[in-house]
Amino acid sequence: MDMNSKWMNKTFLALSIQMVMGVAFAAEEPALGEYETVDEEVVVETAASVPDQTRQVETQAAEESELGEYEAVEEAVVETAAPVETQANQVVDASQALQQQEGDATQAANLEEVFTSNERQYSLIKQGEISSYYDIDYTYYRDTQLDIEMAQGQLYQLRVQENATHSMTNTFTFQYGVKDNLTLTASLPLVAKTDLLKDTSTAGLGDISLGARWEPFPLKAGRLPLILFGNLSTKTGDSPYEINAATDLAAGKGYYSAGVGASTRKYIDPVVLFASVSANYGFKESGLNQRRGSRIIEEFEPGVSGGFAFGFAYSFNYDVSMTMSYQQSFNTGAEFNYNTGESYSAADQTSSTFAISLGVRVSPETIVNGTVGLGLTEDAPDVSLGLSFPLDILGFGKKIS
């Protein structure tokens, strides 16, 4: 009995231990299953990520392809930029050439304007336009003259005349454009003179003159412009043959005269060359009653006078310009007739002057010119000074419709 109880107890203990171990083993199996499940999920996720990676690779390839296309476009743009840049350079070159041409034209027009403002006999004004100028000129003339006449070895006339004259002439000039190729002019001088040796002076109206300038041929490339001009000078000033020559001064020349001439000019960058010729004829004056020594002058024949001039104008810039010219004139054929029936032929005279003019632009449309002249011969004034400016700035210039 005791033996059976021991075996039963051992058997029950063994079964109990076996059941406990079985339960423990069974408890460990779900954990292992979970681990295996986790491994499977990892494997599944890894397997699932393979298509994703494949899609990423395809997307990256596509993006690289697109990047390649952009790079191709950029290369095409770069390749296109070369001809565009060339075209731009061509446009710039053309613009610079056009600006240069416009600059040349502007310089030529400016030089032409500067030149004609000082040398008005070389230009015309447009039809229907009027313009006016004011000129003030100062001259100093000193000379000693001997009037001698000999016939058959005898001296009939000996007269020593010394002159030291200061003259101031204020001239108002008006111009009107009848046509584009025809301009009429009128000049009104006011003269003041002083002779220091005679200790006398005078002031009054000078000789009014009328003139015209005509361009017979239209301007064409390669052909020099030609302007013909003419003038008629009156004797409105005091006549030197109707005063006391020993004590008085005259404001005029004392006779009528008519003159003709021609002028031309040529623009050669950067200067304007110009030249002119002229001739004048003085009409005979009679009925005079001026005492010269022991005789009385009854008639005076002025004779013929003429001259030429040439020079150039240069523009330093838009505001400042310079004109240099040489002028030479002569007078021949002058003759005096006396109450005794005798006549006297005066010696021919030649006058040469070198002049420099400086023009300054004081406004876009106004140029003031100052001139200095130096006499080169005995019959020319020793020194001459001049100032000229348009009266248009005072409202005396406009267009008549």
Image: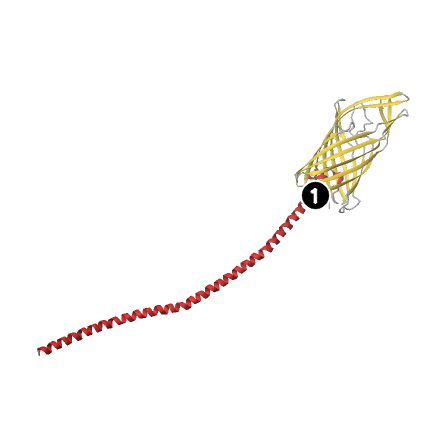
The residue positioned 34% from the left and 69% from the top of the image is 41
Left or right: residue 244 compared with residue 47: right
Question: Which image quarter: residue 272?
Answer: top right
Q: In the depicted view, which residue is nearer to us: 51 or 114?
A: 51
Question: Which image quarter: residue 1?
Answer: bottom left
Q: Residue at the top extreme?
A: 154
261 lies above or below 193: below
The residue positioned 59% from the left and 55% from the top of the image is 82
Q: Residue at the left extreme?
A: 1
Left or right: residue 273 compared with residue 241: left
Structure colour scheme: secondary structure
Residue 75: x %, y % from top left: 55, 58
Residue 129: x %, y % from top left: 73, 43
Task: Give amino acid for label 1.
Answer: Ala
Residue 365: x %, y % from top left: 68, 41
Q: In the depicted view, which residue is nearer to us: 47 or 171?
A: 47
Question: Which image quarter: residue 335?
Answer: top right
Q: In the depicted view, which residue is nearer to us: 90 or 271?
A: 90
> Which residue lies under the disc numbered 1?
108
The residue positioned 12% from the left and 77% from the top of the image is 7
Disc 1 packing (10 Å; few <14; some 14–19; many ≥20)? some
